[in-house]
């Protein structure tokens, strides 16, 4: 790697140098301001008054982010690895909507995806502990995926049955014009949202609706229980990863600095 590429790599990807920290802080502020512009321009009164100025500023930010993305590719140690990494994809998505807006009206609204780039603040501020906690939650959700899929499959079957019954009982005269629309009503009822745009009018329909509501209250906590159980398991595994180098005993809390058995300073797993 040439001296220029190495220097750019330290500034753009690194956080240990003053130049690298300054670059990252500037980048985060640029991201936040550009997203704020997208939000503000969606307000009709502001768009009419400042729309042209916001348009110019948006293209300035898009130009800066495009140059930054190309520089990241140029100075990456492994260019292919960066391009197909999470942040590489997000960096690309952060600039694509502006160019798509030239062909598709309203595509620039998707620029809010730039907020994902602010996740770099964890790396910049050395908040690795928070990233580990986020990974813990992500692992718990991933481990719960099969149970949750089975749960939702069962709920889908239940909603189809309730929808079909309500379609027969209430019929188009009371707003249940089709089985899919009746299924929509069932989902809204079981999840206790209750928009009220479709309501049963017959006694039998109201009885079925009451049953659906009670079922909704009884099962609404099931996904939470599934994730909580997996989270507890992951927390146990996370604690077991902290092993004292002095007494070799594990089971310490994630934020422990000293061994609770012998008082020896723990080597934190980053």
Image: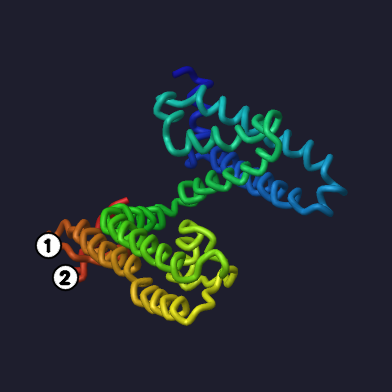
Residue 92, numbered label: none
Mark 2 residue element: loop
On screen, 69 above or below 241?
A: above
Q: Nearer the viewer, residue 47 or 76?
A: 47
On screen, 173 above or below 138?
A: below
Q: Nearer the viewer, residue 259 or 34?
A: 34
Residue at 30% across, 54% down: 145
On screen, 116 above or below 225?
A: above
On screen, 234 above or below 85?
A: below
Bin the neighbour count of mark 2 within 10 Å (Cα to Cα): few under 14, some 14-19, many 20 and up.
few
Bin the neighbour count of mark 1 within 10 Å (Cα to Cα): few under 14, some 14-19, many 20 and up.
few
Q: Estimate the x, y position of residue 60 in percent, counting from the top left.
A: 73, 34
Quickly name the residue at label 1.
Answer: 247
Among the 4 quarters of the image, the one containing residue 81: top left
Q: Estimate the x, y position of residue 18 in percent, counting from the top left.
A: 55, 41
Quickly name the residue at label 2.
Answer: 261
Sequence-first disc among 2 and 1? 1
């Amino acid at each position: 790697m040439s001296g220029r590429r190495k220097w750019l790599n330290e500034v753009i990807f690194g956080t240990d140098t003053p130049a690298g920290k300054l670059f990252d802080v500037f980048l985060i502020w640029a991201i936040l301001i550009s997203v704020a512009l997208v939000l503000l321009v969606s307000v009709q009164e502001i768009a009419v008054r400042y729309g042209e100025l916001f348009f110019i500023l948006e293209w300035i930010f898009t130009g800066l982010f495009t140059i930054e993305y190309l520089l990241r590719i140029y100075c990456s140690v492994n260019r292919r690895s960066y391009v197909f990494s999470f942040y590489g994809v997000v960096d690309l998505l952060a600039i694509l909507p502006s160019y798509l807006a030239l062909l598709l009206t309203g595509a620039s609204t998707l620029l809010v995806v730039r907020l994902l780039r602010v996740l770099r603040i964890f790396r910049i501020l050395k908040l690795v502990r928070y990233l580990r906690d986020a990974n813990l939650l992500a692992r718990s959700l991933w481990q719960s995926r099969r149970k949750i899929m089975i749960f939702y499959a069962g709920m889908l079957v239940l909603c189809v049955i309730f929808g079909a019954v309500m379609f027969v009982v209430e019929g188009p005269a009371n707003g249940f014009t089709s089985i899919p629309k009746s299924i929509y009503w069932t989902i809204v009822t079981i999840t206790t949202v209750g928009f009220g745009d479709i309501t049963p009018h017959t006694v039998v329909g109201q009885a079925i609706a009451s049953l659906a509501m009670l079922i909704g209250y009884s099962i609404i906590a099931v996904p939470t229980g599934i994730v909580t159980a997996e989270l507890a398991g992951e927390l146990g595994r996370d604690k077991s990863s902290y092993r004292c180098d002095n007494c070799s005993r594990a089971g310490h809390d994630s934020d422990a600095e000293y061994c609770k058995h012998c008082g020896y300073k723990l080597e934190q797993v980053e």
